[in-house]
Image (tube, rainbow, N blue to C red):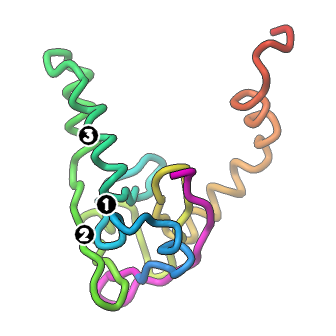
Amino acid sequence: MTGFIGEYHCKLDAKGRLLIPSEMRKQLSPDDHGQFIVSRGVDDCLSLYTSTEWVQVMNKLRKLNRFKPKDRKFARMFQKGATKVMVDGSGRILIPKGLSSWASLQKEVVLVANVDLWELWDKERYEELMREDWDGFDQLAQDVMGDSTDGE
């Protein structure tokens, strides 16, 4: 997989189901069409992992030292509420109510590609975050992606 791309504005139906956009489905491997793992993300969003990616994340968690308090705490917090969701015959997934509430999801949501996972945001919160962060994007790009051999 080379990574996901895209930003999709969607709506949750009255039962909390999300229709997976067709352009997003086209980016999934055949092995990953039937289910996702939904978990708490960072910055008040939810993370949608493909089954393939979830296995890789779990392999990393298995390498943590469970005798170190920080490692135990991280593993516990990272997995809190993580739920396997199946794609129904109409191409929808049911977002668990506890996770939906935690991320303050309303009817209008945004699915955003983030390299190897998808983030699910409440539309207003996502737009607010993008407005807040955009002014500092030039400096952030330099700090994160700039060449570290340029004399610093």
Mark 2 and mark 3: span between their CA atoms? 17 Å
Q: Which residue is mark 1?
A: 38
Q: Residue at x 70, y 48 (%)?
A: 133
Residue 80 in the figure: left or right of residue 129: left
| 150 drawn magenta | no
- Residue 64 vertical placement versus 43 (above, below): above
Q: Residue furthest right?
A: 151
Instruction: Give the main secondary structure of the magenta stretch.
Output: loop
Q: Which residues are magenta?
A: 1-18
Q: Residue at x 15, y 22 (%)?
A: 66
Q: Residue at x 32, y 41 (%)?
A: 57
Residue 85: numbered disc:
2
How many C-alpha atoms fall within 10 Å of the one at disc 3: few (<14), some, or many (≥20)? few
* Type of amino acid at the residue the image marks with label 1: Val
Q: Which residue is mark 3?
A: 58
The quarter holding residue 62 reads: top left
Quadrant, the C terminus: top right
Q: Residue at x 31, y 64 (%)?
A: 36
Pointers 2 and 1 in contact (C-beta within 8 Å): yes
Where disc 1 sits, the SS reads strand
Mark 3 and mark 1: span between their CA atoms? 14 Å
| 15 drawn magenta | yes
Where is residue 94? Give x, y as percent.
Answer: 28, 77
Where is residue 126? Give x, y as percent.
Answer: 58, 62
Mark 2 or mark 3: name the one nearer the start of the chain: 3
Pointers 2 and 3 in contact (C-beta within 8 Å): no
Residue 142 in the figure: left or right of residue 31: right
